Image (spheres, grey):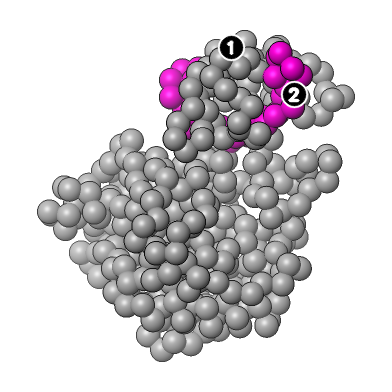
Amino acid sequence: MRSADFAFDLPPELIAQQPAPTREGSRLLVLHRDTRRWEHRRFDELPAFLRRGDLLVFNDTRVIPARLRGVKSDTGGAFEILLLEPAGPLEWWCLAKPGKSLRPGSQLTFRHPDPAAPSPAALTAEVLAANDQGHRLLRFAGTTDVLAAARELGEIPLPPYIQRGSDGVQATDRDRYQTVYAREDGSVAAPTAGLHFTDGTLARLRELGAELAFVTLHVGLGTFAPVKVEDLSRHLMHEERYHLPAATAAAVNRARAEGRRVIAVGTTSARVLESAARHTAGAVSGELTPITNGRTRLFLHPPAEFRVIDGLFTNFHLPQSTLLMLVSAFAAPGAESGREFILQAYAEAVRERYRFFSYGDAMLIV
């Protein structure tokens, strides 16, 4: 299939710039794969579409304040970086802007985004290397903990389609662009399907007989990097780090053995489970095995098969994105017809003025 096959028209005013007044206040479009129909609902009606014994799998990654701003020590030229992945105790691979000016050997000094804020201890870095993807390897100084320094100096890296003024991220973003169950630092973007859930929601799901489990996938460039080739078979995903705990692997294996549904909350949770199913041990045995420090480039697009999940809770995604392609594959596993079904549902969502992308409304596919 081609990238252009996943294009659709989206009025700019439907791109949600603010979260709903409450986490549970979003709309929910429910898609039924067997009958190719949909229903317009509210998120708080989600339990009506779940069965006792359903296993819901959430991604517990935490968004880090990954955007850091500063100046080059020699010229005073401004720059910003996005922390991507640690390469050592004080070394990180980063996305830099502007990147070309940050050559190996460049010395950097970081600043607080609010000029009126008290100046913390100086944080500096040296550019050590650049890779073929244009990322920079930085070695930091002035701290013994880069993430701790980022909490003082950094900003939550909102997606570029969420517009903020010169003041940058808002106080509400620091809370709402994070799931209530986030606990593992490492992401540069939120697993946005989880933003709708509250502690109360999770408690209600348990009371109704659902089982909850958690995986970790640190959301990086692999999730939101654009597809730059027309032939999808030539697109290479960036690697993302993931962890499948033993308790979650066992819960999935029990659910499948007992004929209960496994529902991924978010495309990132789906990618962990489907990546684990393709792991050598799991592929041989048919069961998931725990995976620590896993890495995945899994790119699911029509006509991909799914080996683990029976349902998917997700947000509305960007045109021609790998996330839209994954959702289209799940709408009709093993076939290409899911693309048409999803694009029809998206057109309906546009007509009904649903809110799109990270702070937008939700979709359940069962």
Q: The residue under label 1 is which amino acid type?
A: Ala
Q: Main secondary structure of the magenta part?
A: strand
Q: Specify whether residue 238 is in view.
A: yes
Q: Quadrant of the N terminus?
A: bottom left
Q: Earlier in the sequence, mark 2 or mark 1?
A: 2
Q: Nearer the viewer, residue 299 or 349?
A: 299
Residue at 75% of width from left, 42% of height from top? 169
Expressed as whole percent of the image width and height from the top left, the position of residue 152 reads 69, 24
Magenta region includes residue 88? yes
Residue neighbourhood size for the residue with mark 1, other residues' Cα within 10 Å, grouped as few (<14), some (14–19), many (≥20): some
Expressed as whole percent of the image width and height from the top left, the position of residue 361 reads 63, 67
Q: Secondary structure at mark 1?
A: strand
Q: Secondary structure at mark 2?
A: loop
Disc 2 designates what residue?
77
Q: Quadrant of the C terminus?
A: bottom left
- In this rendering, position of residue 35 left or right of residue 204: left
Magenta region includes residue 146? no
Q: Nearer the viewer, residue 79 or 14?
A: 79
Residue neighbourhood size for the residue with mark 2, other residues' Cα within 10 Å, grouped as few (<14), some (14–19), many (≥20): few
Q: CA distance from mark 2 to mark 1?
A: 19 Å
Disc 1 designates what residue?
141
* Image: 176 above or below 362: above
Residue at 32% of width from left, 72% of height from top? 303
Expressed as whole percent of the image width and height from the top left, the position of residue 72 reads 70, 19
Give the image quarter of residue 262. Answer: bottom left
